[in-house]
Amino acid sequence: MDSRIIIFDTTLRDGEQSPGCSMNGDEKIRMAKQLERLRVDVMEAGFPIASTGDFEAVRRIAGTIEQSTVAALCRAVQGDIDRAWEAIGSARRPRIHTFIATSDIHLVHKLRKTRSEVLNDAVRAVAYAKSLCDDVEFSCEDASRSDIGFLAEIVAAAIEAGANVINLPDTVGYAIPREYGQMFKTIRERVQNIDRAILSAHCHNDLGLAVANSLAAVENGARQVECTMNGIGERAGNAALEELVLAIKTRHETLGVHTAIHTEEISRSSKLLTSLTGMMVQRNKAIVGANAFAHEAGIHQDGVLKSAITYEIMTPQSVGIRESTLVLGKHSGRHALRQRCAELGYELEPAELERVYQEFCVIADRKKEVFDDELIAIVEQGDGGFVEEYHLEGLHVSTGTALRPTATVELRRAEERLVDSAIGDGPVDAVYKAMERITGMVGKLTEYTLKSVSLGHDAVGEAFVRVMFDGVQFNGRAVSTDVITGSAKAYLEAMNRACAARKRKEEREQQSVIVPHT
């Protein structure tokens, strides 16, 4: 049996059906291009009969994608199939994906048809689709709750009618791995013409078992797996592409299979999807979560610093992340603390390291994470406070759909008032660029978040930024009923912290200079 697993990505169809995850045509094109860079074998572009907009998006994707197969979903109805073919007919590698429910639960309560009627519908649909397109996939909706005898019968008939791929979905996430794997094994044993089709798994995550069930299917003969980026999809979502692919890659010796996915594009694909849909990934999400390659526990940090393999079963670079992160918090140890101090330019002797560590622990017990500027203050025996170099006196922002965002900012430094203007990609960007022009400090914004801390139209918002100046991270936080003002104050706080750190560094360097005797 072939060891190559075909990755069928349905982010643009099943994933987009997730509440709050809909994308317009241009956004779907952007995501489709990224999925092709990820090297998915098949991308399901949409459900053309659903709406004019979805039809047009599928048609555009079909005309854009060059390497991946482009599939369109349709019910086992001739009108649906015609619409699907109209949308994907121009694709270099088109696939018609037609489906009908096969469980008695769906037959009785949804379709209100007999098994023989459903069987006939399936055969007619597959045969008609085959007359239009060489590549036809047939799905038995709710296969995991279907009678195994009827399932084997309809699978055999669909293959005879021309289906190249047979999909056996766990549509409602009901199965457990042993059951789902056994279903594939039984179908392979009972369906005599099964060698003429590829078996596919499509799992939902209602019980959190989508990836586990998909792997169980692979172990029992499935050679295509249907999944989505970030695991988005109906209800609790689908099997997550990144989890499935990295499980296969990391445990390839045990599973004996592989994919053609360019895993270094996974992080970028995940971030693009988040940007397009606004559906954030939880920090502890496997593979693509912010904490997936972050370590705070001292024992773990010590191990990773000695050899990453101690606590990392895959490298962050393998999914497109530059490096692991050692988070300095109350669980961190001396090894990680000394390492970060060295990165900030401080080589600490054992006695000094112990002092810094004890003071660090006091602060870490009060907050979740200790930032670079706070660590610098500890090393230099400060209390973490700083004198503000610049004060915000005022700002004016002009923006709109037909205007280039422009900001004028006035800062005060001692008795001097400093004013400058800048344009940006947005109002906040314009404000930050104006502040950088005034201060001469250009930072790299590495984190920017806004959240409401109260309710109502006049809610107070909290802005948080993390900015890198001279290779050191500085954080700033501010609250305001105006998000632009709050964003400006937060960035200015980070700037002031950087100014204070620069001054302390200059003073330390001056004190270390030995003046020779004359």
Image: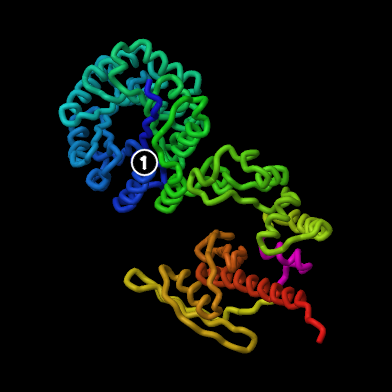
The residue carrying pointer 1 sits among few (fewer than 14), some (14 to 19) or many (20 or more) residues within 10 Å by Cα, namely some
Give the vertical position of 48 relative to 429 (above or below): above
Q: Specify whether 188 is left or right of 236.
A: left
Does dot 1 land on a helix, a strand or a loop? loop
- Identify the amino acid type marked 1: Arg
The spot of residue 495 in percent (x, y) is 60, 72
- Residue sitting at the far right: 351
- Residue sitting at the far front: 518
Q: Quadrant of residue 466?
A: bottom right
Task: State the quadrant of the N terminus.
Answer: top left
Residue situated in front as seen by the camera: 273 or 55: 273
The structure residue drawn at horizontal position 27% and vertical position 45%, both measured from the top left corner, is 65
The residue beneath circle 1 is: 39
Number of numbered discs present?
1
Tell me, yes or no, whether the highlighted magenta stretch contains residue 143.
no
Residue situated in front as seen by the camera: 92 or 435: 92
The structure residue drawn at horizontal position 30% and vertical position 53%, both measured from the top left corner, is 26
Residue situated in front as seen by the camera: 386 or 83: 386
- Residue sitting at the far left: 131
Q: Specify whether 284 is left or right of 63.
A: right
The spot of residue 352 in percent (x, y) is 81, 60
Task: State the quadrant of the C terminus.
Answer: bottom right
Q: Quadrant of residue 115?
A: top left
The spot of residue 296 in percent (x, y) is 67, 48
| Residue 368 in view in this figure | no
The spot of residue 27 in percent (x, y) is 34, 52
| Residue 181 in view in this figure | yes
The structure residue drawn at horizontal position 78% and vertical position 56%, both measured from the top left corner, is 357
Tell me, yes or no, whether the highlighted magenta stretch contains residue 376.
yes
Q: Quadrant of residue 257?
A: top left
Range of magenta residues: 371-386
Residue situated in front as seen by the camera: 175 or 104: 175
